Image (cartoon, helix red, strand yellow):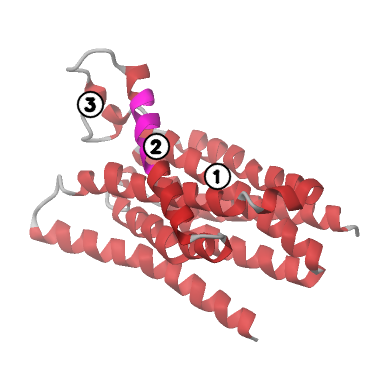
């Protein structure tokens, strides 16, 4: 099989497996429990951003200051993008879109934000898979497995966010699958123009991290404060820690695998 065929097969299978596994896990969450799982989503997003995406961006960038600037600019970009989504739904100050309480008032804006960030991340994953295969077939296979393992806990959080944002389960699945196509696109572009795209990996990772941080801090955490009672707070802290821990565990397992 040619390198191009390996890239096509791996990006396609990787995207389908990560989204499929995440959907299967998220489908088990009843509507009553979706809001409770937002804490896990916050942890998964922050864990992925600070433990995986940002370190990789810094390692591959020519300057840490460049990555920091991209993250800062990305947060501002997503703020403006969110404002644009709000403006589309509302042109008066008293509109429900200005209320962040729950799904009906969300109008899908948080879901749209997570899809934009996820698309960036999937695109970069495709580039990384292609680069690995162009170096060595076995390295490409191992890299694909590592990316799938890293994506599943994050995709579970993304899927829950889409449900929380008012998406139906089928619509959330379809949009997640469409977002995952970016993995295939990134792999193909990297194969045909790897040298040109290599320099774009750090800024794209910075933008992906910015989207994760912005969504967790600006959109999701304020909603958790709607339940200030002690029991709810303990539950939320536990779920945030579980989300971070799942990302850390995947990193540890993948690191051990590469060490051997």
User: Principal SS element in the magenta part?
Assistant: helix
The magenta region covers: 75-85
Asked which secondary structure carries label 3, the reply is helix
Which is in the foreground here, disc 2 or disc 3?
A: 2
Q: Is residue 3 magenta?
A: no
Q: Position of residue 73 (x, y in %)?
A: 41, 42
Task: Tell me the residue at 35%/44% (across/down).
Answer: 215
The residue identified by callout 2 is 78
Which mark is on residue 98? 3
Q: Quadrant of the N terminus?
A: bottom right
Among the two numbered marks 3 and 1 on one chain, the one whose residue lies closer to the N terminus:
3
The numbered mark at residue 153 is none
**Res 249 quadrant in image:** bottom left
Q: How far, Cα to Cα, is label 3 from label 1?
A: 27 Å
| Residue receiving disc 1 | 120
**Residue 27 seen in the figure:** no
**Element assignment for label 1:** helix
Quarter of the figure with the C terminus: bottom right
């Amino acid at each position: 099989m040619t390198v191009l065929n390996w890239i096509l097969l791996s990006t396609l299978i990787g995207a389908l497996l990560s989204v499929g596994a995440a959907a299967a896990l998220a489908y088990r969450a009843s509507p009553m429990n979706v809001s409770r799982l937002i804490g896990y989503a916050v942890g998964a997003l922050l864990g992925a951003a600070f433990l995986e995406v940002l370190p990789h961006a810094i390692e591959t960038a020519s300057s840490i200051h460049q990555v920091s600037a991209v993250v800062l600019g990305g947060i501002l970009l997503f703020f403006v993008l969110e404002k644009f989504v709000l403006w589309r739904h509302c042109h008066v100050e008293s509109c429900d879109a200005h209320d962040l309480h729950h799904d009906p008032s969300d109008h899908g804006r948080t879901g749209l934000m997570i899809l934009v960030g996820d698309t960036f991340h999937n695109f970069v994953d495709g580039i990384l898979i292609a680069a690995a295969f162009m170096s060595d077939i076995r390295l490409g296979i191992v890299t694909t497995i590592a990316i799938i393992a890293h994506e599943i806990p994050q995709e579970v959080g993304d899927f829950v966010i889409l449900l929380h944002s008012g998406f139906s389960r089928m619509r959330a699945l379809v949009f997640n699958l469409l977002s995952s196509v970016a993995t295939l696109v990134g792999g193909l572009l990297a194969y045909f123009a790897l040298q040109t795209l290599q320099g774009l990996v750090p800024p794209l990772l910075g933008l992906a991290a910015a989207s994760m941080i912005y969504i967790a801090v600006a959109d999701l955490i304020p909603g958790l404060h709607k339940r200030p009672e002690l029991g709810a707070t303990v539950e939320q802290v536990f779920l945030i820690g579980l989300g971070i821990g799942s990302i850390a565990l995947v990193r540890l397992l993948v690191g051990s695998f590469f060490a051997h």
